[in-house]
Image (spheres, helix red, strand yellow):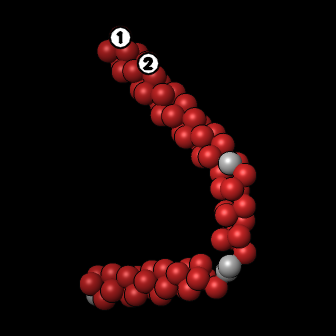
Amino acid sequence: MNNKLKRVALLIALCIMNVFVFAQNMNTKTEDATDFMRSEGKLYVVMAVVVTILLGLFIYLINLDRKIKKLEKKN
């Protein structure tokens, strides 16, 4: 029974992924928007902001982990 449930879940997941792939091919307006942003240089600004935010989150999590380890050793 468990294997059958896994197979059904996998089949549903693959069908959903298939829908997303076809949906991406049908939308041509996003290609024009990315070309415009790339030509204006704004795409690189957006990517730089995203990378900066992610780096900040990772640094915050690392510092938080260190503080928690210190508190655990103290007690």
Q: Nearer the viewer, mark 2 or mark 1?
A: 2
Which residue is labeled 1 in the image? 74
The amino acid beneath tag 2 is: Lys
Q: Position of residue 50 (x, y in %)?
A: 60, 43
Foreground pick, 59 / 12: 59
Instruction: Please indicate whether residue 65 sits to the left or right of residue 55 in the image.
Output: left
The picture places residue 66, in percent across and down from the top left corner, at: 39, 21
In the foreground, 8 or 43: 43
Give me the residue at 33% from left, 86% from top: 7
* SS label for mark 2: helix
- Is 5 in front, or is 53? 53
Seen in the picture, residue 30 relative to 40 is either above or below; the reply is below
Q: Is residue 15 visible?
A: yes
Determine crowd level at label 1: few under 14, some 14-19, many 20+ residues with C-alpha closer than 10 A.
few
> Which residue is at the front of the view, 21 or 8?
21
Position of residue 69 in the picture relative to residue 55 (left or right): left
As displayed, is residue 70 above or below residue 10?
above
Res 16 visible: no
For the residue carrying disc 2, how many other residues have a C-alpha within 10 Å: few (<14), some (14-19), or many (20+)?
Answer: few
Q: Residue at x 66, y 43 (%)?
A: 45
Badge number at residue 50: none
* Residue matched to label 2: 67
Amino acid under disc 1: Lys
